[in-house]
Amino acid sequence: MECRVLSIQSHVVRGYVGNKSASFPLQVSIVPRRLAAQYTRDYYVIVLDRLAGGERKGHMVLGFEVDSINSVQFSNHTGYSHWKGQVLTADELHVLYEGIKLNNVNHYDYVLTGYTRDTSFLEMVVDIVQELKRANPNLVYVCDPVLGDHGSMYVPQNLHPVYKNKVVPVADIITPNQFEAELLTGKNISTEKDAVEVMDLLHKMGPDTVVITSSDLPPRLGDRFLVSFGSQRILMPDGTRTTQRIRIEVPKVDAVFVGTGDLFAAMLLAWTHHYPTDLKTACEKTFSVMHHVIQRTISYAHEMAGPGRRPSPAQLELRMVQSKADIEDPAIVMEATVL
Amino acid sequence: MDCRVLSVQSHVVRGYVGNKSASFPLQVLGFEVDTINSVQFSNHTGYEHWKGQVLTADELQVLYEGIKLNNVNQYDYVLTGYTRDDSFLDMVVDIVQELKRANPNLVYVCDPVLGDNGAMYVPENLLPIYRDKVVPAADIITPNQFEAELLLEQKLKLSVVFQVMNLLHSMGPDTVVITSSELPSPLGDQYLVALGSQKRVTADGTMVTQQIRMDIPRVDAVFVGTGDLFAAMLLAWTHLHPNDLKMACEKTVSVIYHVIKRTITYAKEVAGPNRRPSPAQLELRMVQSKADIEDPAIVLNALVL
């Protein structure tokens, strides 16, 4: 059977953010067929048929089916000198969902959302997620609660209570950065212990899987790295709950990339699907994909810009299609520590 | 170096038509695909219900302006398909002409979607626009028999195949593929006939034309999005085999064949025995066909005429 994702994100004509950043990688990902016909994220799943040299292709389900609702259509992302385009209203979103529903095809395994600027749009997204969860109680909602970074919000302030009170409570996987995690919980992160407590607070709000995608805590590997954390609550077959927490240090890059957060959330969706009770491996794979795409992008950008010149936003667009092999089967280049 | 395509087609939330049908296969083959979505619908119009919004010609221009203001309006290919609005189509032509001024080597791949099986399924006033403005700006076109006949005001018959292809060339495009026709196939009536013709200038300056015919097994099902997939893959395979229309068509047709076969098998499986698959079940098995898209095994050969 297939695995279907509903992704509600921006569309840009040129470049890789929002749905442009999420769709292609999910479509080329390799999805293993599950043994159990029905499963929930709370139970151990025996995952069969890992891809091995192509001989088992007959048993594989290749690629996520990605249905995409484009929340905006812009010429390019807003980091360029200019951008132009149109936005989708909450009503128009509702109309599109109605079309899907009228055809009785409103059945999804995942919902994926990211950067949104409008409260009524966000509320409509929550309504849709709740209805889809009634249709499929096993649906997993992967939410990047995009609020801001480096100490300041870059969406309207009135989105904060909507995320906190409505969105995060229905999410199953969230990928806040440190600022967003602190904002949602009202607690600062100065130490690893703080990070663990904040992730526990986030679990209490709803999601069983939390990844703090970046923080400014001091890395053990030196200042060329940054520290990320993950936490996953799992219900064991005997009814007890256990929490796996990890810390992972990833190489810092001296450039501003756009669309990497969207790629991260999409790849975390894919790799937690592969490894539903092994956040360590899911994160190692996800962060490794990021690393390969970013490295390829930096090399290309510097080559295009020329020596001594800062690459432009156009030159820094993620080298997505060129990274297909790394997306399909990423070499693991960093190790997560289980806390 | 990057090969960048600007594709101006429909977007559907679910399923594979328009840009949804064209993007993934082109990206899998390594093309950079910039997409302007001419509409956003829940699904294609073969389902019982469909809902969504359309882009106006002005909104199309605004998006193009954004690209242009950033000085990134450089493309190697433009790809267009199904359009319903004459002013939108006019704007597309304006954009193509400007992009060709920016890059004279730009190749415009145009599926001149007008109708099929004897009837138009777009507004009639699009025909003169395709005939007088769009096709003259195009480099590769993929009409079906009905569309070729409409454009030329001439019927396609065995006795005039070469003339018809040459008349289409004289309208503008150096590469013409008539994607399906009711011409009789030597293999019998379970086959339809496709024709291709490519004019090119050889190294020593002479003009040569390669013409081919393919006999393609008919399938007993209605697919949506296969024409869009065909045009996208013809773009890719003529790019990779620029002087060999035979090879480009064999690969293109083979990809469609593999995708359709996988789709039919799946559709019948989910529909159950003796039930007609629904439009939802007949959506192309696109992501599952990745390997066939990347490296299609040739299953049909073209005959050089």
Image: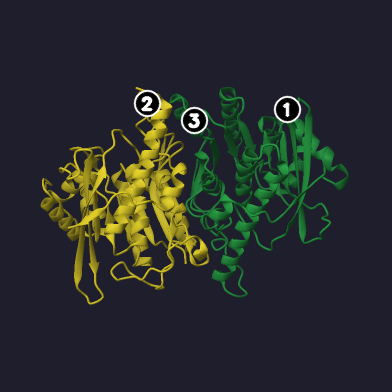
Q: Residues within 10 Å of mark 1 (few under 14, many from 20)?
A: few
Task: Name the element at disc 1.
Answer: loop
B54 up-or-down from A36: above or below: above
Q: The residue under label 2 is which amino acid type?
A: Ser
Report the side of A329 relative to B61 (left or right).
left
Q: How crowded is mark 3: few (under 14 residues within 10 Å), some or many (20 or more)?
A: many
Q: Where is residue B278 in the image (x, y as percent from the top left)?
A: 57, 64
Report the side of B274 relative to B216 (left or right).
left
Q: Where is residue A89 in the image (x, y as percent from the top left)?
A: 38, 44
Q: Residues within 10 Å of mark 2 (few under 14, many from 20)?
A: few
- For marks 2 and 3, give the CA distance: 15 Å
What residue do we see at 60% from left, 35% from top? B89
| Residue denoted by label 2 | A81
Residue extending furthest toward the right: B159
Output the chain of dot 2.
Answer: A
Output the chain of dot 1.
Answer: B
Q: Position of residue A270 (x, y in %)?
A: 37, 56
Q: The residue under label 1 is which amino acid type?
A: Ala
Residue extending furthest toward the bottom: A238
Chain letter, green in picture: B
| Residue denoted by label 1 | B203
Task: Name the element at disc 2.
Answer: loop
Q: Chain A is drawn in which colour?
A: yellow
| Residue denoted by label 3 | B64
A201 up-or-down from A42: above or below: above
